[in-house]
Amino acid sequence: MNIKEIQNLIKFVAKSGATEVKLEMNDVKITIRTGEGRGKGETTIIQQLPTMAAPQVVAQLPVDATPVSADATSNEDEDSKYITVKSPIIGTFYRKSSPDLPSFVEVGDTIKDGDVVCIIEAMKLFNEIESEVSGKIVKVLVDDASPVEFDQPLFLVDPS
């Protein structure tokens, strides 16, 4: 199973609303927990197994009713004209490739489709995150060296 398949599995689990999914195939065992019952966060555990196991998927659907405050809706209206660049994976967010180098992007920078905007470290792999939109960076929503979740907003981009 390659990293792209694992990322797609994480996306699927996050969208399904399941709190935990376990997948065992050949010599790989994957457990994805969204942590909705215990607080925020997603955990992905990938483990090499010494023996072959039959594929097994366990999923539970949570009951979740989260109230939305009036302040949150006013911020959403204000930010609705912007496009959000979101994290495609969970990991640690870095704005620059090395502590002594400048950030990939700053507020006010113009980016185009395919430009690297940050790096997310996941399982000791540094993944360059490329923009899927063109525009001007309006806001950086995550602090450098902070953990991020799948689909967490990272940047706001003004497409005009």
Image (tube, helix red, strand yellow):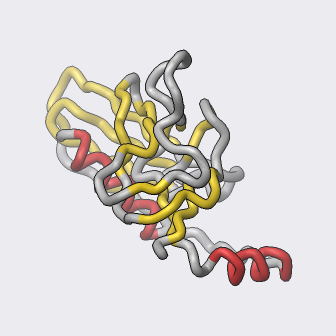
Q: Is residue 134 above or below residue 101?
A: below
Quarter location, residue 144? top right
Quarter location, residue 97? top left
The image shows residue 94 at horizontal and vertical percentages of: 53, 33
Q: Is residue 22 above or below residue 93?
A: below
Q: Nearer the viewer, residue 63 or 148?
A: 148
Quick one: which residue is furthest to the right in this view? 70
On the rendered structure, is 152 left or right of 4? Answer: right
On the rendered structure, is 18 left or right of 106? Answer: left
Asked whether residue 61 appears in the rendered view, the answer is: no
Q: Is residue 103 above or below residue 38?
A: above
Q: Nearer the viewer, residue 116 or 53?
A: 116
The image shows residue 89 at horizontal and vertical percentages of: 42, 47
x 25%, y 40%: residue: 3
x 18%, y 30%: residue: 27
The image shows residue 10 at horizontal and vertical percentages of: 38, 53
Asked whether residue 17 appears in the rendered view, the answer is: yes
Numbered circles on residues, count? 0
x 53%, y 69%: residue: 158
Q: Is residue 131 above or below residue 54?
A: below
On the rendered structure, is 21 left or right of 82? Answer: left
x 18%, y 40%: residue: 1
On the rendered structure, is 157 left or right of 78? Answer: left
The image shows residue 115 at horizontal and vertical percentages of: 34, 49
Q: Nearer the viewer, residue 128 or 107?
A: 107
